[in-house]
């Protein structure tokens, strides 16, 4: 799939093209062997990728409203495929135990609305962003020169990881091009399930830093993260107890990728940790 000015090629509209997911999708569309016309407008198109960002406003009602507007607009113009960047319904999966993981529940609600609307829908769920380990979840340097990753999650907990900028677009292209996917499908965008213990072990090996993990109490972590701390605590506890993808297998979603997605080791090997772990 290559970018082209041909109006006979399928039009692909990317909502949120400047973000990690949208930018990745555009890169992979351009690199593909087939021929779409990549457009950033919202008219006369065949395929739409819908993405919303909860963290811009942290307002679940606003995110759901924006998502429904994308769905309604896609249906109104008769798209052949609406691709939604969704997540699992945490409140439902946990039986009401974890009700504050709003950025998951809102995206799940929009996916459900899209299904009920009748728009041709494929849901491509991004896994755990590996970039979190260079931003929101950087280990803290200790007095003895070692580093500590203090999180409210057990070392044995598994995360399905994704190098979002590099690889999310590959899964979207798979949803568009592979006959195994398309409308009615769900794609789980993650390269591997890896435990927290194996993450810090690999991280130490690759970076040359001594990094350890410690499971901390929920209230301690929440106080360290003033914006959305309680939500992140519930999110991590949900991952530990029910699984990021609610126990779903990610292997079927990798069958038609054109190249393997980056594992944690590959991501860590390509990151300059001297700058991140200053």
Image (cartoon, helix red, strand yellow):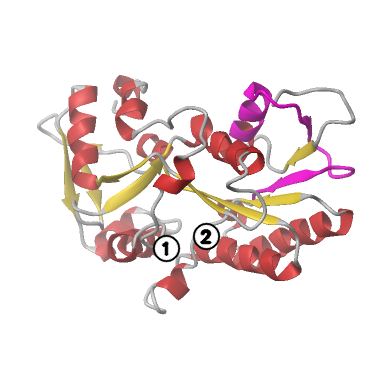
Q: Residues within 10 Å of mark 1 (few under 14, many from 20)?
A: some
Left or right of residue 137, residue 104 in this image: right
- Nearest the viewer among 70 and 56 is 70
In the rendered structure, which segment of residues is drawn in magenta? 24-51
Residue on which disc 2 sits = 103
The residue nearer to you, when weighing 94 against 228, is 94
- In the displayed structure, does residue 221 sit left or right of residue 98? left
Instruction: State whether residue 263 appears in this view.
Output: yes
Report the number of discs.
2
- Residue that badge 1 annotates: 231
Tag shown at residue 16: none
Q: Are marks 2 and 1 in contact (CB under 8 Å)?
A: yes
Residue for point 66% across, 34% down = 18
Task: Report x, y in % for residue 5.
Answer: 86, 23
Determine which quarter of the picture holds residue 217: bottom left
Give the residue at x 24% y 39%: 199
Q: Secondary structure at mark 1?
A: helix
Determine the image quadrant of residue 154: bottom left
Residue 46 against residue 98 in the figure, above or below: above
Q: Is residue 39 magenta?
A: yes
Give residue 25's position: percent from left, percent from top.
62, 34
Residue at screen point 80% across, 54% down: 74
**Camera-side residue: 111 or 97?**
111
**Which secondary structure lies at badge 2?**
helix
Q: In the visual, does 136 lie left or right of 196?
A: right
**Residue depicted at x 72% and y 43%:** 15
Q: Position of residue 69 (x, y in %)?
A: 77, 60
Q: Where's the C terminus, which quadrant?
A: top left
Q: Is residue 99 visible?
A: no
The x and y percentages for residue 139 are: 26, 38
Looking at this rendering, what residue extends furthest in the bottom direction?
Answer: 96
Q: Quadrant of the N terminus?
A: top right
């Amino acid at each position: 799939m290559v970018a082209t000015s041909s109006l006979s090629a399928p039009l692909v509209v990317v909502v949120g093209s400047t973000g990690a997911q949208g930018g990745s999708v555009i890169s992979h569309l351009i690199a593909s062997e087939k021929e779409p016309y990549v457009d950033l407008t919202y008219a006369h198109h065949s395929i739409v990728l819908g993405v919303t960002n909860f963290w811009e406003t942290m307002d679940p009602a606003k995110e759901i409203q924006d998502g429904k507007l994308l769905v309604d607009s896609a249906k109104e113009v008769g798209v052949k495929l609406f691709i939604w960047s969704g997540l699992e319904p945490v409140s439902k999966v946990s039986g009401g135990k974890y009700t504050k993981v709003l950025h998951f529940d809102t995206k799940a609600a929009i996916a459900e609305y899209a299904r009920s609307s009748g728009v041709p829908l494929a849901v491509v769920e991004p896994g755990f962003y590996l970039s979190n380990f260079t931003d929101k979840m950087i280990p803290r340097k200790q007095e003895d020169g070692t580093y500590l990753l203090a999180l409210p999650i057990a070392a044995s907990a598994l995360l399905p990881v994704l190098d979002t900028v590099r690889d999310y677009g590959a899964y979207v292209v798979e949803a568009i091009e592979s006959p195994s996917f398309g409308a009615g499908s769900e794609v789980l965008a993650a390269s591997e399930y890896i435990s927290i213990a194996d993450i810090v072990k690999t991280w130490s090996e690759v970076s040359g830093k001594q990094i350890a993990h410690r499971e901390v109490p929920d209230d301690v972590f929440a106080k360290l993260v003033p914006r959305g701390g309680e939500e992140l605590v519930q999110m991590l506890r949900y991952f530990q107890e029910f699984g990021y993808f609610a126990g779903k297998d990610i292997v079927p979603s990798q069958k038609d990728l054109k190249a393997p997605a980056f594992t944690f080791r590959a991501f860590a090997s390509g990151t300059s940790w001297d700058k991140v772990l200053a």
